[in-house]
Image (cartoon, rainbow, N blue to C red):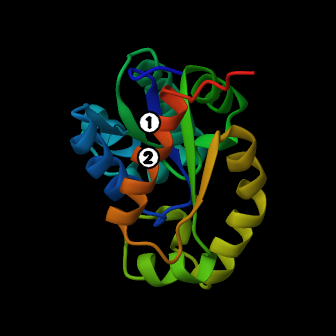
Amino acid sequence: MNAQTNIYLVGLMGAGKTTVGRQLAKKLGRPFFDSDHEIVERTGVPIPTIFEIEGESGFRKRESQTISELTATQGIVMATGGGAVLDPENRRVMHDTGWVVYLNVPPMMLYQRTRNDRNRPLLQVEDPLARLESLHAVRDPLYRETAHFVVNGGQLLAAGIVNYLLKEFSQQCNPVTQIP
């Protein structure tokens, strides 16, 4: 890993990937991308509309294409959509081309953060907390498989997470050499 290695943030919706990613990119002087925002920009319609017209599978195809294109660049910070890890190729390409950070936040806290957000199609159900718990159960192993580093971010503010990641990233890029 070097100072130009891409940084990818993964985790469930509401984990703080975009907030942390923007701040991290600013501190590092790098471009920031949010794969969901890129999809909206490219299609010209909100994500719920894509889900309505193309279904989740159509959205996932767009997501994979976007991730493939963004991971081909160098020196970026990217926040991914919560389901990006469902595709094995997305997991592989992120793991192989960058430093993947999993922002792990408990489902109850995610529910508190997202309960009034109508732009999250997977949470437009009778029991959004149960959905978040189910998504966490399925995706947590995939996030962990993909990640190089896990932050249990439930109790930390974004600025604290950013400072923690900056320190860890710096250590990963410039490891202290042990002299025998």
With 29 as the anchor, is 72 left or right in this view?
right
What residue type is disc 2 on? Lys
The quadrant where residue 126 appears: bottom right
Q: Identify the secondary structure beneath mark 2.
A: helix
Circles 2, 1 touching at the beta carbon (< 8 Å) = yes
- Secondary structure, mark 1, is helix
Which disc number belongs to residue 109? none
**Residue wearing tag 1:** 170
The location of residue 88, given as percent across then percent down, is 72, 31
Task: Give me the disc on residue 167.
Answer: 2
Q: Nearer the viewer, residue 143 or 88?
A: 143
Residue 74 sits in quarter: top left
Label 1 environment density (alpha carbons within 10 Å; few <14, some 14–19, many ≥20): few
Tell me the crowding category of disc 2: few under 14, some 14 to 19, or many 20 or more residues within 10 angstroms, Cα based.
Answer: few
Q: Position of residue 120 (x, y in %)?
A: 44, 64
Q: Amino acid at mark 1?
A: Ser
Mark 2 vs mark 1, CA separation in Å: 5 Å
Image location (x, y in percent) of residue 13: 50, 62
> Residue 127 vs residue 173: left or right?
right
Q: If the image is split into quadrants, where does the N terminus sit?
A: top right
Q: Residue at x 65, y 42 (%)?
A: 147
- Vertical placement of 87 versus 113: above or below? above
Q: Is the residue 91 above or below the residue 68 in the image?
A: below
